[in-house]
Image (cartoon, helix red, strand yellow):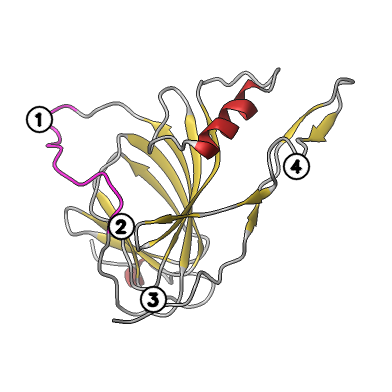
Amino acid sequence: MVCHPENPLPHIHRYITTHSTEGEAVFVSHAQVPDYMPSTPSGTDGEIALLYSTTSTPENTSDECDIAMYDEFLHQPPGITVENGTVFRMIDLRPGKATPMHRTVSLDYAILLEGCVDLVLDSGESRRLGRGDVVVQRGTAHSFRNVDTDRWCRLLFLVVKGRELEAEVYDEGFDKSDGEGEGGGDGCDEGGGGDGGDRGGE
């Protein structure tokens, strides 16, 4: 069994703004919501951090109810999505690990911040993502696989609740939980995944 070192990626600080009683823009105090953003284990495959979450759209920011709700979510995390709200999440995958093939009822905006990842769809199509590449994930079955066997990768997600697809369009049958997967393969060049031909077949 190969033992990988602890996560070497930088710790994240998350800063939230609000308004003072005089109406000026200020930062939420560290005492109210800590700036330091801890990650929690996600099975044996990596770590996950909830950067922020809201419960309504549009969100009312005239008070600080959203901040209070987020503080509650830090102690009792929400699911993949929040009804009528948003989830801002970061996931770090260990070397050679993958998420299971799964489908979320959501619209996901994803950015690869560090590493090299294969995004694999249930059709067999895939794309190789390099640092800075983005994905618009529209409620389809997928798996993210860290292709590096010696480096962690980091993905950033903004998740918005979606509608269930019609039964005749999609048969729900994929795992929705985190789990262990298989990685492997060649890595990406530093700073990007190369051109489209290098990122996977059609």
Which stretch appears magenta?
Answer: 166-179
Q: Secondary structure at mark 3?
A: loop
Q: Earlier in the sequence, mark 4 or mark 1?
A: 4
Q: Earlier in the sequence, mark 1 or mark 2?
A: 2
Residue 195, placed above or below residue 132: below
Q: Secondary structure at mark 4?
A: loop
Residue assigned mark 1: 168
Q: Is residue 165 left or right of residue 104?
A: left
Residue assigned mark 4: 30
Residue at x-position 82% and y-position 34%: 26
Whether residue 174 appears in magenta in the rendering, the answer is: yes
Q: Secondary structure at mark 1?
A: loop
Seen from the viewer's position, the closer of residues 165 and 28 is 28
Number of labels in the image equals 4
Q: Pick the quarter of the image with the C terminus.
A: bottom left
Mark linked to residue 148: 3
- Labels 4, 3: front one: 4
Measure the alpha-carbon separation of dots 4 and 3: 36 Å
Measure the alpha-carbon separation of dots 4 and 2: 33 Å
Mark linked to residue 119: none
- Labels 1, 2: front one: 2
Measure the alpha-carbon separation of dots 1 and 3: 37 Å
